[in-house]
Image (cartoon, rainbow, N blue to C red):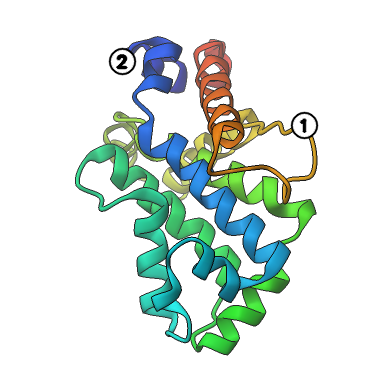
Amino acid sequence: MLARHVPVLGGAGGAAAGARAGRSGVQRLGALLAGVGGTGLESTLTSLGLATLVGRTRFDVLDELITFIAGDGDDLDSQAARDAACDVLDEVFGDADTWTELTDTAETAVSRENLLTLLETFLAQYVYNRVPVIAERLSRITDPHALRQADEEMRQIIQVLVSLRIPHDPYAVDWAGPEGRQIAEDTVLMTYEALQGLDGDAQ
């Protein structure tokens, strides 16, 4: 199913070209995470033009960050990115609610070692959310256990295929600039090429 999805989006090249919210989301999330891990949440929000969020509680902070990363959700592409961003930010902030809790949790959760994993999770979730036939196919499964298993298998396949490659320290990447844009474009294209190349057993 996953491999057959790619031609619907115009092949690997067309799918990658249309993944605007995914590409920009990788860059913006990369800038956010690298900043949080390197200089802390407060200074990062200020540097990203989000200083009004400093001192706010969970709902306000996460709502604005999701929009910053993925846009307003005014089309299916942006909505796919928003849902993916929500999943990743839940990992970063955990159950934190107050500003102090948000700061402490995020700065503990983000490290050089897991920054790429968080970005890959975002992209994998985004690609999954963008597959137009998944909901239709899963709705045909009546057994709840089989439904959960099929859903998890498809998510795992995509997660394995996403591989974000950077040339050096992720904290030093200019995520908002040409370097970050190239990393995002290359990763999205390689992911769709890998999906397109899946054999029948993996679909």
Q: Which residue is mark 1?
A: 167
Quarter holding the N terminus is top left
Q: Residues within 10 Å of mark 2 (few under 14, many from 20)?
A: few
Q: Which residue is mark 2?
A: 8
Q: What residue lies at 72% left-to-right and 72% top-to-bottom?
A: 108
Q: Would residue 45 be found to the left or right of residue 74 on screen?
A: right
User: In the picture, residue 129 is in which quadrant?
Assistant: top left
Q: Secondary structure at mark 2?
A: helix
- Image coordinates for residue 18, horizontal then vertical, percent: 34, 24
- Image coordinates for residue 77, horizontal then vertical, percent: 30, 37
Count of marks placed on residues = 2
Q: What residue lies at 53% left-to-right and 32% top-to-bottom?
A: 181
Q: Is residue 17 above or below residue 146?
A: above
Q: Is residue 154 above or below residue 45?
A: above
Q: Disc 2 or disc 1, which is closer to the eye?
A: 1
- Image coordinates for residue 200, horizontal then vertical, percent: 53, 12
Q: Secondary structure at mark 1?
A: loop
Q: What residue lies at 42% left-to-right and 69% top-to-bottom?
A: 62
Q: Amino acid at mark 2?
A: Val
Q: Amino acid at mark 1?
A: Pro
Q: Nearer the viewer, residue 165 or 28?
A: 28
Q: Is residue 103 above or below residue 67?
A: below
- Image coordinates for residue 186, horizontal then vertical, percent: 57, 23
Distance CA(mark 2)–CA(mark 1) = 33 Å
- Mark sitting on residue 43: none
Work out whether mark 2 precedes mark 1 in sequence or the reverse, and give the earlier one: 2
- Using the rendered image of the protein, determine whether residue 144 is visible from the camera's viewpoint: no
Q: Is residue 180 above or below residue 119?
A: above
Q: Would residue 67 be found to the left or right of residue 146 on screen?
A: left
